[in-house]
């Protein structure tokens, strides 16, 4: 198993050092009030970081400490961070204070891939991340990277909820992990600085940044362009310096990242959602008392449901912000069927990489659809 690799061992050692260093420097974990609704959130400053001795290895007294890492900014209206705060609030409530969650936002403890390895190795207890960063360790979750798997949020929620037991079994078998929640940040849309993209034809010749994710690269290739994989933290500069003309991310990300400063046009290609699991190590979870385990699972489920509502309200605000700031939203492409047909034609090329057809087949069955075949 990949957890046994030398890289992982080194990763674990590095993580321990990071935690120790964080403790030594009083690197703050975020200990914040309960999350607010979007209207309140926009008025709320980024949560005050309480310099707790958060990165200490384990809890005082009888408390169970869950060290929670994620890569999002600790801003009250960031849906990913909001979700982590909601989980913290609920698990502390449902465990009657027996569990304490210490949140380390903004990748303080390392990258999202590193977070998966650290939870696998028991260096930290819990992490949330973009699903594409978990696929390398747990191939079956790659089903959520398949373009046009979902046509609407309702379809996505149906699959998240209907497939979670089966997918968890795969996650446990492949990586020793369980996802106790699936949350989302909306469908990814295309933005660019050059021209309105209403058809596949308009897309040709544009240089588009994508994450280094084979399925996202494959989708753009199917549309006739050669996308440029660039790390997320270099994306704004790449757009500003015109290294690339465009990128694709959800509206909430485009607004919070101020892409309206460097991008002019939006096309609602909706080819893929930003989806994230909340992962714990199965062995650790099963070693907890039943009431603690139940509190963690219940808190995860409820935090995800609350986040779904929050992110939809936030998205409405984000679309308004983007257009108020001067961006032009062309809506979906007029030849959307062709975008979909071409992107879905690549699915069979990737079944092997995502643990076979079993999970995508089950997902499609939940949606009453056929699995694309060669
Ligand atoms: C990306 O495009 O790399 C991600 O969607 C950024 C993120 O994690 O929000």
Image: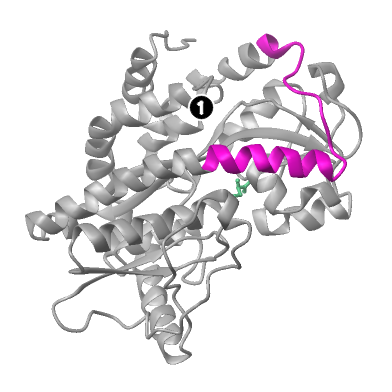
Image coordinates for residue 92, horizontal then vertical, percent: 26, 63
In this view, the residue in front, 142 or 28, is 28
Q: Relative to 331, say whether 184 is above or below.
A: below
Q: Residue at x 36, y 34 (%)?
A: 140
Image coordinates for residue 112, horizontal then vertical, percent: 48, 57
Q: Is 235 covered by the magenta stretch?
A: no
Instruction: Name the side, left or right, on which 291 lies relative to 233.
Output: left
Q: Relative to 195, say whether 294 is above or below.
A: below
In this view, the residue in front, 166 or 77, is 77
In this view, the residue in front, 261 or 98, is 98
Q: Residue at x 22, y 37 (%)?
A: 169
User: Which secondary structure, mark 1?
Assistant: loop
Q: Determine which quarter of the picture holds residue 333.
A: top right
Q: Residue at x 43, y 42 (%)?
A: 183
Image coordinates for residue 344, horizontal then vertical, percent: 56, 17
Q: Determine which quarter of the picture holds residue 63.
A: bottom left
Label 1 packing within 10 angstroms: few (<14), some (14-19), many (20+): many
Tell me, yes or no, if residue 230 can be seen here: no
Q: Relative to 22, say whether 303 is above or below.
A: above
Instruction: Name the side, left or right, on which 340 lies relative to 29.
Output: right
The residue that label 1 is drawn on is 146
Q: Main secondary structure of the magenta part?
A: helix
Q: Residue at x 78, y 49 (%)?
A: 259
Q: Is 328 covered by the magenta stretch?
A: yes
The region drawn magenta spans 311-338
Tell me, yes or no, if residue 205 can be seen here: yes
């Amino acid at each position: 198993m990949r957890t046994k690799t030398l890289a992982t061992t080194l990763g674990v050692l590095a993580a321990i050092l990071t935690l120790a260093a964080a403790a030594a420097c009083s690197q703050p974990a975020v200990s914040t009030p309960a999350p607010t609704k979007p209207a309140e959130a926009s008025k709320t400053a980024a949560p005050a970081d309480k310099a707790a001795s958060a990165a200490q290895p384990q809890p005082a007294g009888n408390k169970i400490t869950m060290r929670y890492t994620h890569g999002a900014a600790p801003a009250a209206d960031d849906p990913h961070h909001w979700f982590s705060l909601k989980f913290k609030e609920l698990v502390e409530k449902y465990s009657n204070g027996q569990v304490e969650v210490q949140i380390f936002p903004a990748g303080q403890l390392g990258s999202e891939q590193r977070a998966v390895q650290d939870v696998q190795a028991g260096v930290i207890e819990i992490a949330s991340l973009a699903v594409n960063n978990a696929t390398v360790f747990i191939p079956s979750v790659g089903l959520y990277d398949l373009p046009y798997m979902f046509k609407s949020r309702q379809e996505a929620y149906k699959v998240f909820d209907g497939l979670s037991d089966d997918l968890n079994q795969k996650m446990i078998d492949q990586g020793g992990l369980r996802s106790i929640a699936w949350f989302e940040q909306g469908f990814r849309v295309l933005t660019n600085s050059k021209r309105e993209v209403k058809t596949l034809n308009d897309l040709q010749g544009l240089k588009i940044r994508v994450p280094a994710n084979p399925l996202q690269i494959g989708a753009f290739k199917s549309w006739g362009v050669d996308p440029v994989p660039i790390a997320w933290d270099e994306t704004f500069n790449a757009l500003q310096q015109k290294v690339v003309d465009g990128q694709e991310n959800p509206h909430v990300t485009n607004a919070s990242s101020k892409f309206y400063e460097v991008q002019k046009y939006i096309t609602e290609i909706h080819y893929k959602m930003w989806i994230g699991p909340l992962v714990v190590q199965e062995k650790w979870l099963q070693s907890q008392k039943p009431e603690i385990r139940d509190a963690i699972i219940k808190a995860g489920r409820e935090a995800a449901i609350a986040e779904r509502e929050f992110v939809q309200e936030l998205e409405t605000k984000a679309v308004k912000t983007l257009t108020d700031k001067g961006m032009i939203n062309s809506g979906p492409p007029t030849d959307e069927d062709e975008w979909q047909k071409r992107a879905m034609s690549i699915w069979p090329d990737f079944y092997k990489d995502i643990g076979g057809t079993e999970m995508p087949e089950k997902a499609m069955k939940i949606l009453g659809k056929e699995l694309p075949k060669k």
